Image (tube, rainbow, N blue to C red):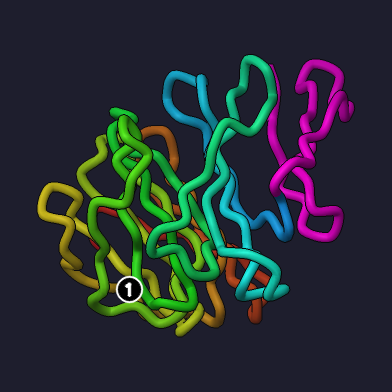
Amino acid sequence: TYAYVANQGSSNVVIINTASNTVVNSITSGFSEPQGVAFSPSGTYAYVTNCNTSCFGNGPDNVVIINTASNTVTGSITSDISQPSGVAFSPSGTYAYVANANSNNVVIINTASNTVTGSITSGFNEPYGVAFSPSGTYAYVTNLGNNVVIINTASNTVTGSITSGFNKPYGVAFSPSGTYAYVTNYNYDNVLIINTGTS
């Protein structure tokens, strides 16, 4: 019914009614430079990555939590967050991954307690986007250092990377079947298609 858009220049999150494709509201509280946004599988909450210190020096970088029923900010997560960009929920909703560009890692959030429970550090060079496969078995993370890193979510370890054809890859998303992943490739002005069965 609704889509949320992280609006960097205006320091807010804009809400779009998808039936009419019109902006119906915005959320301004607690944002400096919102980067990424993801809904929990239940739709009850949205997590928004927010760049404060790294971008403006006026407060801690954080992940802002929105209650989607009231469209109000109900809290934030600051621990171990440094220039966060992409964010994604696991299909079960139990965990969220946040790509932490300044720290070259992916932070793991337990969504029941809204606390950081660990991080994945191997193989990252300015991680930016993150997406879970529909099965939840793997997560793909785009690295501005020109590759896509593959995480095994059962062990939270990096199991490989894809390097061919990338130049500052940003966003990543899986097809509903999980057969393909699409990656936006900033410097080459294209979208790369990955066959996940052979990656």
Quarter of the figure with residue 28: top right
Q: Indicate whether 36 appears above or below 29.
A: below
Residue 176 visible at all? yes
Closer to the camera in the image, 28 or 96: 28
Q: Position of residue 63 (x, y in %)?
A: 52, 50
Q: Which residues are magenta?
A: 1-30
Residue 83 is situated, as x and y percent measured from the top left of the image, at: 54, 69
Q: Residue at x 68, y 54 (%)?
A: 34
Front one among 152 and 112: 112
**Which residue does the numbered mark 1 point to in the structure image?**
162
Query: Is residue 54 found inside the magenta-colored segment of the image?
Result: no
Q: Residue at x 57, y 44 (%)?
A: 64
Q: Is residue 94 left or right of residue 26?
A: left
From the image, which quarter does the C terminus lie in?
bottom left
**Which residue sits furthest left?**
155
Residue shown at the point (51%, 21%) measured from the top left: 43
- Tell me, yes or no, whether the highlighted magenta stretch contains residue 24: yes
Percent across and percent down for residue 47 are 53, 40
Drawn side of residue 179 relative to residue 20, left or right: left
- Three-letter amino acid code of the residue under disc 1: Ile
Name the quadrant of the N terminus.
top right
Location of residue 145 with respect to 117 vertically, above or below: below
Q: Main secondary structure of the magenta part?
A: strand
Whole-percent x and y of residue 176? 42, 33
From this view, report whether residue 110 is shown above or below residue 163.
Answer: above
Is residue 91 something one can see in this rendering? Answer: no
Query: In this orientation, which residue lies closer to the viewer: 102 or 149?
Result: 102
**What residue lies at 68% left-to-right and 75% top-to-bottom?**
57
Left or right? Give the position of 175 relative to 18.
left
